[in-house]
Amino acid sequence: MSGIFIRAISKSFGDTRVLNGVNLDIAPGEFMTLVGPSGCGKTTLLRIISGLDHQDSGSVVIDDRVIDRLRPCDRDLAMVFQSYALYPHLTVFDNIAVPLRMKHLNFAQRFPLVGGMVPGKQRIESGVRKSVVKAAETLEIGHLLDRKPSQLSGGQRQRVALGRAMVRDPIAFLMDEPLSNLDAKLRAHMRTEIVQLHRRLGATFVYVTHDQAEAMTMSDRIAVIMAGDILQVATPDVIYHDPVDVRVAQFIGSPKINLLPAMVNEGGAVAILGHDLPMTVPLLAGTALTAGVRTEDFFLSPQGEGTWYAAIVHIENLGPEFLLHALMEGVSTPIIVRAETAFARTLDIGMEISLSVSGDRVLLFDTDGRRVRPHSASADLRMTG
């Protein structure tokens, strides 16, 4: 296992700045996911680590060794691509065997006609076969070794790409959106398989995705990247419940977090749409804030007992729960509230619901999007009018 350390990496393509002095420490054996919207710089950072792209400034360090001048093949890193990059004319066995043969066979031994007569080839091929079969058995594709890629499903092709990376026994695996070409059901299954593979191998994984569900379910830690900057690096639980930036709060979570206008009153008290929260902040009266409330953190109160009233404009039936889209006075876009099935079935479009929220479940952000932390909050108090 090896740690990977990113030091002040910057990169531009022409006049377009892609990475802005990024710093990131990835611990040995860690599953680190780089997540963010398309164009944020996450794939560029992965390609710089692999050596496929070169940074304008900064360094990549692996176990105290600067690898900036090393070719990709000399970095001992295995890359798994979004497109699988399998050779269509080779069998599964030969696709997995490619990196081993390139590493251990010389030019003469790889020559199709006379290579078999070159001393040492049979011994090397025996070792290659053992490694390929072991990887195939680990990935449960041993019965597919004689097939061509065109005869495989998307999930099977992805396993072949993983097997080809595994046989190299690299110091780290780099994965660039490897599940994006799969359907939703298979994607969920392969998420579990990759996590289990990481546990078995104990290797360092650096995983790139724009899918926040993948990031949340697979990672030891997540690095949220936007516009070339890392906004936050933390565990999935911290990223979700304790975001340091409103952009992180909006990106992580499905549906998106609800954002409501808030204001600081005298003594630092915080009010949302005129209703006070049981907390104070170290800001001047009159300071505008944004309050973030997750869909599951609203309380659906009995009619007339809540803090706000909202009119239902859309209902999503997800089976075990419903999502209620409702218009609230003072909020420009519909808020989204999770509701239990039994209660939601009594509702209809146009009906009014009564809402409240516990003060400790509200996230506050300033006008620059940075997190504002209160002096105190009570988990037992609800907002009062």
Image (cartoon, rainbow, N blue to C red):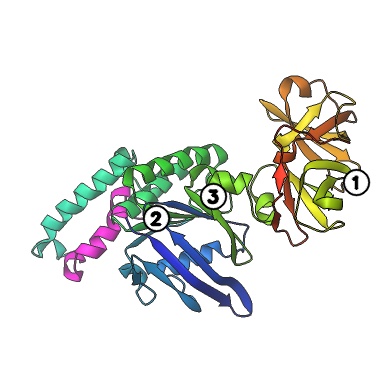
Q: Amino acid at mark 2?
A: Leu
- Residue at 56% x, 40% y: name it: 184
- Residue at 36% x, 55% y: name it: 28
For marks 3 and 2, the one nearer the N-term is: 2
User: Where residue 314 sits in the image (x, y, percent)?
Assistant: 82, 35
Above or below, comparing residue 113 to residue 262 in the picture:
below
For marks 3 and 1, the one nearer the N-term is: 3
Closer to viewer: mark 3 or mark 1: 1
Residue 111 is one of the magenta-drawn residues: yes
Closer to viewer: mark 3 or mark 2: 3
Q: Are marks 2 and 1 in contact (CB under 8 Å)?
A: no
Residue 223 is one of the magenta-drawn residues: no
The residue singled out by tag 3 in the image is: 180
Where disc 1 sits, the SS reads loop
Q: Taking 39 as reference, is 149 left or right? A: left
Q: Taking 290 as reference, is 108 left or right? A: left
- Determine which of the numbered discs, if any, sits on residue 330 in the image: 1
Above or below, comparing residue 78 to residue 332 in the picture:
below
Q: Amino acid at mark 1?
A: Gly
| Residue reaching furthest to the front | 267
Local packing at callout 1 (Cα closer than 10 Å; few below 14, some 14-19, many 20+) is few
Q: Quadrant of residue 114?
A: bottom left
For marks 2 and 1, the one nearer the N-term is: 2
The residue singled out by tag 2 in the image is: 86
Magenta residues (range): 86-112
Alpha carbon distance from label 3 to label 1? 39 Å
User: Where residue 274 sits in the image (x, y, percent)?
Assistant: 90, 44
